Amino acid sequence: MNVKQIYDHTIKPLPASDRLKLATLILNDIPPQCVVDYSDEWSEEDYRDFSKASWEHINKRLEKINV
């Protein structure tokens, strides 16, 4: 059974108050590390990761040209 089927058959028929309690339980059970930061600001780590990926891409392209 997939998530949509579970929702349709088990969760959806519940009263709104019970669905809200269930949603709260589920959201509170998700660790903060799993939450994606959609901030427009870049951290130092973001800059390092971007620079590293950029140089790796450039190096791969140059290797193809020089072969």
Image (cartoon, rainbow, N blue to C red):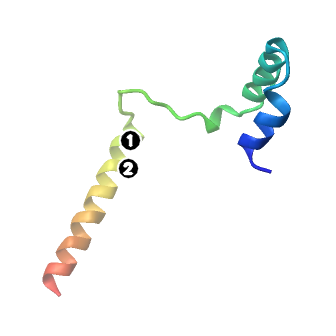
Picture residue at 20% right of the left edge, 71% below the top: 61
Answer with the quarter of the image where residue 7 lies. top right
In this orientation, which residue lies closer to the viewer: 3 or 46? Answer: 3
Q: Amino acid at mark 1?
A: Asp
In this orientation, which residue lies closer to the viewer: 6 or 56? Answer: 6
Give SS at disc 2.
helix
Compared across the picture, whether 27 is left or right of 43 comes to: right
Residue 46's disc is 1
Picture residue at 80% right of the left edge, 40% below the top: 6
**Which residue is farthest left?**
65
| Image: 22 above or below 36 | above
Compared across the picture, whether 31 is left or right of 14 comes to: left
- Report crowding for label 1: few under 14, some 14 to 19, many 20 or more residues within 10 A (C-alpha): few
Q: Residue 44: where, in percent of width, then height?
A: 37, 37
**Which residue is farthest bottom?**
67
- Report crowding for label 2: few under 14, some 14 to 19, many 20 or more residues within 10 A (C-alpha): few
User: How far is mark 2 from mark 1, CA to CA?
Assistant: 5 Å
Residue 49's disc is 2
Question: Are the residues flagged by discs 2 and 1 in contact, CB closer than 8 Å?
Answer: yes
